[in-house]
Structure formats: structure tokens, C-alpha cells
Amino acid sequence: MFNQTIKILLGGTFAVYNEFGAQISEKIFRLNDDGSFDSSLNAIAHFDFYITSIALQQDGKIIVGGAFSSVSSTAQNKIVRLNTDGSLDSSFQTDSGFDDVVHSLLVQQNGKIIVVVVLQRIKELHMKT
């Protein structure tokens, strides 16, 4: 995903990124447009499992989805928001998050977030007709 300053956010299953001898751990990092490591994203957030999707908000905050259940020892079920510096945004509240992996994210122009999950099971629904 490209942000406004032509930087590239990467997330996945990797644990270490190694460029020019610098080792950066934890499943998310950012590159400059020339492919060099961008140290301004201080990936303080430590994901306990893999990342599947990243979306960038207009204010530069980063929405991350995946299979993780905690970020930096804080329960964050499958979705989290990071500040522009990579730290955990504690103001982003999703109650208990999601039971299943977040496969895709999209931030609409109005700021609302679309989240795609594949449901493994559906609880009993009670609908009025």
C-alpha cells in the first residue's frame, strides 16, 4: 500500500527484515520510494501472529488486520490501529474484535472502515419479518 509521501507499508508473516545489516522485527515495516528502510516507522507494535491487510487513513494512521490476537501484549482481536510512528493507538476501540481472520480492509473517504472476514460459522439469527 502506498501512502501520500510515496512510502510503502509491508506486512505479512515475516519476523525479520534485514537491509544493510539492520534487523527490524515484527510483521510490519515501511520502505521509502527507493526501497530503503524507513526508520520513521518505529514498529513498536509486536504482533503475535501474521498480518493480512493494511489500510491507511487520511490522517496517516495505519489500520492493520490479520490473524493476530494480541499486539504488544494487549488483546487486539484481528484488527488494530497504529499511530503514524507505529505505536499502538489505544483510542481505537473494537470491543472484542473479530473471531476470524481479517482478510481485507478499506478506508472509505468518509473515514468508515470496511472489513472483510470469512465466517467459519454463523450464530443463530433472529430476524423480524
Image: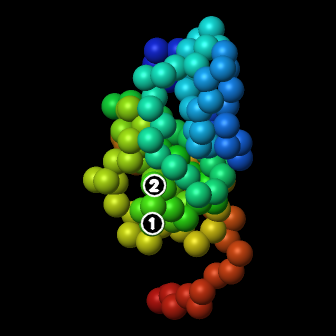
Q: Give 52 or 118, whichever is nearer the viewer.
A: 52
Q: Amino acid at mark 2?
A: Ser
Residue ID at (71%, 46%): 13
| Residue 49 against residue 127 in the figure, above or below | above
Provide residue 10's location: percent of width, then percent of height: 62, 33
Q: Quadrant of residue 1?
A: top right
Locate residue 44, reporting x and y percent: 44, 41
Q: Which residue is mark 1?
A: 75
> Where is residue 93 shown, x and y percent of the image?
34, 60
In the rendered structure, the answer to whether residue 116 lies left or right of residue 113 reads right
Name the foreground residue: 106 vs 9: 9
Q: Can residue 57 be seen at all in this image of the molecule?
A: no
Q: Residue at x 45, y 66 (%)?
A: 75
Labelled disc at residue 35: none
- Which sits in the foreground, 29 or 78? 29
The label shown at residue 72 is: 2
The crowding category of the residue bearing disc 2, from other C-alpha atoms within 10 Å (few below 14, some 14 to 19, many at least 20), is: few
State whether residue 71 appears in this view.
yes
Residue 37 spot, x, y in % from top left: 58, 19
